Amino acid sequence: MATPREHVERIRKTKFSIGGEPNPLTEDLHQAVKNLSAELYTKDVHFFMELIQNAEDNEYPEGVDPSLEFVITCRDITATGAPATLLLFNNEKGFSPQNIDSICSVGRSTKKGNRKRGYIGEKGIGFKSVFVITAQPYIFSNGYQIRFNEGPCPYSNLGYIVPEWVDENPTLSDIKEIYGSSFTLPTTTLVLPLKPDKINAVKKQLSCVHPEVLLFLSKIKRLSVREENEDPRLNTVNAIAITSETNFVTRKNIDAESYTLRLSVGENADESEEECSYYMWKQKFPVRRENKVERRMEVEQWVITLAFPNQERLHRGTTLPGIYAFLPTEMVTNFPFIIQADFVLSSSRETILLDNKWNQGILECVPSAFVNAFTSLVKLTEDAPMFNLPRMFGFLPVNSSSYAELNAVRESIRAKLVAEDIVPSESGMSQRLFHKPHEVEYDPILNFLGVSHVNYEWYSKCIQGSNLVLWVSDEVYIDLLLFIAKNWPDFCSPNIKNIPLLKYVSLDGNVSLCSISQSVNWNDPMVVCLSSAYNCVSWMIDWNKEFRCEANHYFMPQSTHLVFQLYPEKSVTILQWLREQAKVVSLDVYNYARVVNNNLSSDRRLVVTYAHFLYHSFLKQYVSTDQVAALCGVMPLVDDFGVVRTRRTRVLVPATGSKWANLVSPNLWRQEDYVVLGEDYLRPSNFAGQTTSSQELITFLKSYASASDIPHISPPNSVIPAVSGPLTKENTFLLLDWVRNLKLTGTDLPDKFLTSLMNGSWLKSSINGCSSYRPPSQSFFYSSSWGSILQKGSVLVDIPLVDQIFYGDRLNGYKEALRTLGVMFEFGDACQFIGKHFMYLAASSTLSKDNVLSILNFIRFLREKLLSPQEFISSIKTGRWLRTCGGDRSPDGAVLFDQQWKTASLISDIPFIDDDYYGQEIFSFKTELQLLGVVVGFNGNYQLVVDYLKPSSYLTYLNAEAFLLILRCMRHLRSSDKLIAALSNVKCLKTNQGYRYPYECFLSDPEWGGLLLIFNSFSIIDHDYYGSGIFSYKDELKKLGAMVDFEAAMKAFALIFRQKASSYSIGKEHTMTFLSFYRKLKGTHTFHPELRNCIREVRWLRTRLGDFRSPKDCVLFDLEWKSIYPITVIPFIDSSIKYYGKDIIGYKDELKSMGVVVEFKRGVQFVADGLCFPQDPCRITPANALSLLKCVGILLEEGNGCLPEGFLKKVSTKWLKTKSGYLSPDECLLFDNSTGLEQADGPFIDEEFYGPDIRSNIKELNAIGVIVDVEKGCKLIGSHLSFHSEFSTIIRIYNFLSMRGWKPDSEATRKIWIPDGSSDGNWVDPDDCVLHDKDDLFGSQLYVLDKYYENEVPLRFFSSVFEVRSNPSLDDYCKIWNIWETSGAKLSNEECCAFWGYVKRHQSLKTEKMLAERLVKLPVDSGSDGVLLFNKHDVFIGDDLQLKDYFVLHSPHPLFVWYPQPSLPSLPRTKLTELYRNIGVCTLSGSVQKEDSSSKYGLELKQVNPSDVLIVRGLIRLLLGFLAGPLTMETGERHKAVQCLLDVTVFETSEPATLSYSLSLSSGKILNVRVSQMIRWDRESSKLYTVKIDGTANQKALLEYASSFSEEIAKGVLWEKEDHINSLSELIKLAFLLKFDEEAVGFLLKSKNLQVFVEDEEFLSAAFPSE
């Protein structure tokens, strides 16, 4: 035997002529392999499935779990330069020489013809598909080390299939290094260096391996994918390992078995495995003959496997294929089960071929397999509880598929299941009962099965009468709740509310039930609760027991919570229903704590328990910091008397070990609703399994319940008795610590508390060296020698100093606390102390002149001693102790009078110091007065003038100086609102019309002031009175309301102008003067928009129409308007001598700027609005028309190609002159010589009338509706067709319209001209016309147009435009046939052939129905020259030739339908017979009445054994084989059919039996014939009559008898299936001649591909026991 290398060399030499003569077919073979490899699959990476398929077809050693491994690496072990390499490892037996020969060929797979042995590959080129991703695949197996090349081999010029031996790159050691040196290398390895452009596609396919790929593979048990690189960070492929394990194989019967298969998938080693088990049902079905295909001729049985997933299918993010052909396709069926069979696939392997008869046969068997599997699942799972059965019903294909063929499978499943007992029902017994779907009442999920609905009262009774709620699992429990929730509105009976439905954990920890009525009872509701977080369920249940369910809240069990967590989609509906109908509440720990808190009684133990509950809930992070703080803030507390307190303002730690007890009595806390915690909170305890030490809870309460101690406690708003007398040093510092902490935390000190501390005599002080205890508010803390200085500068001063020696340096750390308590510091505090003393004196009585002078002297003293008097000044500055002319007031704001204030005193009541009271000495203290805030000197102090401004009534008729001072105040102050308010409504301004309000005044300007004089209606400020300086205060005057600028003046002028115009008071002089000033100011001033708008909008210009109009509505006439004027009404300005005169034209530019139209182009809108055609269009001259078109052009430019709708409506009248008279524009055309038409052919514009200029206005004519492109004027030209009668003209117009695709738009234009000579004829309806009549049958019924129009152009035009039929229709043929029927004349053979030839060419159900309804008579074969038409009820199809001959001889007139003589290929006799039959013609055999004459004439009958006339075992075998083959008749039916023959009684006669046949005609006449018959089977009486035939009969007689026998037996057995009688008759005839020999019959059956099944053999044995 040759070695592998020798074998490869022999293939290269003998097959590919390497080293010999070149093969001439090499190039063709190379191209064939290349095309097949590249085009076999629609996707680059379907090689993957092909390689898995090859691995499944491989042979494996015993005891080995077949596995397939894919490894991809970036190592270039082939030295081909490939950036990545794919390796496949398979532990098969390895390549044999035959495998090597196959892979070096095309289409010579070793698997062909081996479908029975389990091979699933079939294409013969599976391995070649790898060339899509690699140019050089390598194979290492059983000593073979070869590779193939995509490119042609240099020695044979052939690629793909020429093997080449490999010695290195790679070696086996290279491969083993990648596979893993510690593992044994599998038998077969494929090495595929990848093409660069295919790497990403291959990696994507490897990363997306479907987890169910092994589901239907019988051999491979493990498949893995991984990437192997030296640097793992380069790995991009998602690793996966899939394993398959089969358990619990159970054979149901000879054709079916079931088992459980488990798939497990692990991705990327660090992730856990996913698993899914599948219930598998495998069933065999015989392949029917009509479904066989060439690819599967050797397969005799279909094996269909259905997979039912028990968990969620493994999908790995991919789609879920529903159809497998051993490997997954890409077909998603939308069914909850998977179909596997040996389907014929498309070349891409993505789908099965749904139109393939092999696949159709498989799909027809799927419903039977499903019903068997489903029945097994439902009925034979004995140990499954009833409530698990609904899960199995989830396998029903309730949802429809996107494939019509699969929907047919779905409907067939439904039909079969409806007849099965598969729906479980509750019987009240241990026996499980099953019913047909229509016999039970069950959940709507079985609507698919047509299960009927029960009323909802039944459900209520069912639940109430059983222990269903506690009995079922929690999964079923929530399904029950979901059902009730979804159908709640239908549960109209109150019973359902009284049924215990809701699970809860009771006080003893057991699961109990309550009804909805209990949970919604207003008087004493029992609240059922759910935990909003699953991890807190047991926590709240345990604590609820500690609280003894005090709040009457109970939680659902933890197991129920778990199911809600697992089924969130169901839970949404259930929870909403529970909340709305059962008032079930969802609580987290926080809200549960609130509920408990609201329901805590005065039970001291429960209150303390609640504090422990909050502490431990916080420790376990069930409540947040904010939440626990909120809960602690409102929880009740047990005080030091053991009383439960629900109200408090503060919480104190227990007195034992506290600091507060040293300073404050507990009674003070209680008065302020402070709670002093009891000793219970200090004791260790254990609740709900949680232990708390002695100090843990107090620490928690300090943090979150504000339990405090000095210095962190907030003080009560009470007097502290301890500070009414001296405090010890320690208590002093404890108190100061407390105050300091309160300040640091920003806590306000209560008034009573602070007052008692500030005024209590507890702080040790010294006054002039003597110690005493004084209040802090009367003590000073000093640090310098300012005290002695102050004593020398003032009397009445005794300052107490804090005893710093007694308290020591520690006191320096409490300065801020001491300052809070009123202790004064440094020099400033001392000054304030002195100031307060003076203010005390001022408060008790008014300070005297001497007191005031003393204060001023004291300030002067401090300044001289270089001490700041600011603190002292601040303490007295606000006191009302300084006398002024306005009474006593504070120094701040008082004024020391001088001459600068004289004018101001005229308009303001300023508070001047009373120098008459204080004397002239007061003027010597100007500096000191200024320090106190007194105003000394005017110094631009305008604000004081405004602050003390006199009332408005004192401000009228002001002199010039006073008014100018007001203007200066307005200029220098930030706000002048007060001055404006005071002066705006008083007559304070002098004008040319006297004193006026500011808003009535105008500050005139030399440039534009004259404009105000036009109407003499304005008050102008008297600038001679105020001087020229008044012009510098324009802004201030403007604020007061005066109009000072051009813009404001023009706005006021606009108002007067508008008033004058409204009363038509603007005369010629006003107008001309205004235009003159307008011209003067236009270039130098910008007019206010109000004035501009006023000028443009108001009606102040007189027009020739006698009315006043705004400028924009006026036109200034010139000669350009002359042509359009006669056909328009336009408002020209009245430039006549009687009004403005010709001078107005001199202001053309000014008028234009105001909006007057002065140019023709800009005034076309007036033409559009004022267009007015004369009643007689003949009065419109060409000049008028052309001028109007000019306006149209301008309108188009302005309207972006659009004209105003109103204008279009006006020009749509008949004013354009055409050859057909005056027409509207949309009825006109512009003539074009190039069209081949003449001017008289349509409504063309009269260019002779308008002249050549009309053509320069094409755009304008088009815009108003004239059709300027004749090509688009077909509609108009067509509408004028009826005005013509000249045939040449009509032909010309037809040709024009035909070339331009014209279509008639009304019945009036939908006419065809039928000429009668050159200038006469008629317009006819196109429905009465046809283009052709090739049989020349319809000349008198229809207008045949090809007789009138020889040119093809009009004919095509008539067909496409007028929809003229090319040929007569079926209706026309029926009409002409009816004419022939009534005429009584004979038809020619040609006419009949023409008629029925047409019918045959257009044969359809519709055609046959119309003929059956419309044809009364049909042609008969008369044998003469002509064809007669007879009543169709008296005409027959001669399907029995012998009978036909008998009736032809005995009938006086023809009886049988006509056939063409001779036969025509275009009208075959068989097709015509079928047509006759379909339109109602009866067959002869079906119409005759038969009568047996044998008994009538006394024919002798002899009963004989059936076997004597060959009714034997061989005949029955033949019949059974035929009935099981082409007819696919079920076993019971075929046995019944042949049993009729076995049951006959056979009678033998000496002569043939005579039969009489009668045929009834429509006239009532009956035709009779008599015939004799050798064999007759009377099925009704189960008798068979046969003529006796002996062995001496000649061959002709024997053949006649065999024919009669076979025909009668075939008709008797298949009397309901006539189509198969002839086939069976021929088969019986042949077997008869062989005397039904068993061996001959067996051979005959096999030759016809027929067989007899086991059940038929059993039937034969029973029928012929002796044989």
Image (cartoon, rainbow, N blue to C red):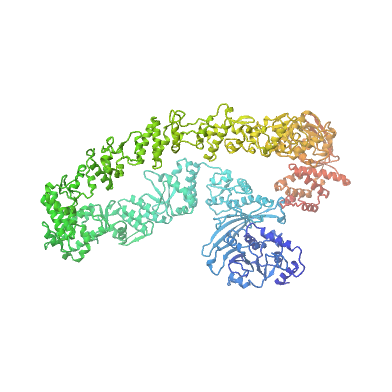
In which image quadrant can residue 1110 be found? top left
Viewer-nearest residue: 526 or 824 = 824
Count of numbered circles in the view: 0
The answer to whether residue 1491 is seen in the rendering is no
Image location (x, y in percent) of residue 640? 25, 56
Report x, y in % for residue 79. Answer: 62, 70
Position of residue 1143 in the picture relative to residue 1604 (left or right): left
Q: Nearer the viewer, residue 1459 or 1450?
A: 1459
Q: Is residue 329 left or right of residue 1442?
A: left
Q: Nearer the viewer, residue 67 or 1151?
A: 1151
Left/right of residue 494 with respect to residue 337 in the rendered view: left
Q: Residue furthest top?
A: 1176
Q: Is residue 469 above or below residue 95?
A: above
**Image quadrant assignment for residue 212:** bottom right
Residue 154 in the image: above or below residue 1468: below
Q: Position of residue 1327 (x, y in %)?
A: 70, 33
Look at the image and tell me whether residue 494 can be seen: yes
x, y (%) of residue 665? 20, 56
Which part of the image, by quadrant, shows the N terminus? bottom right
Q: Of residues 427 and 822, which is closer to you in this image? A: 822
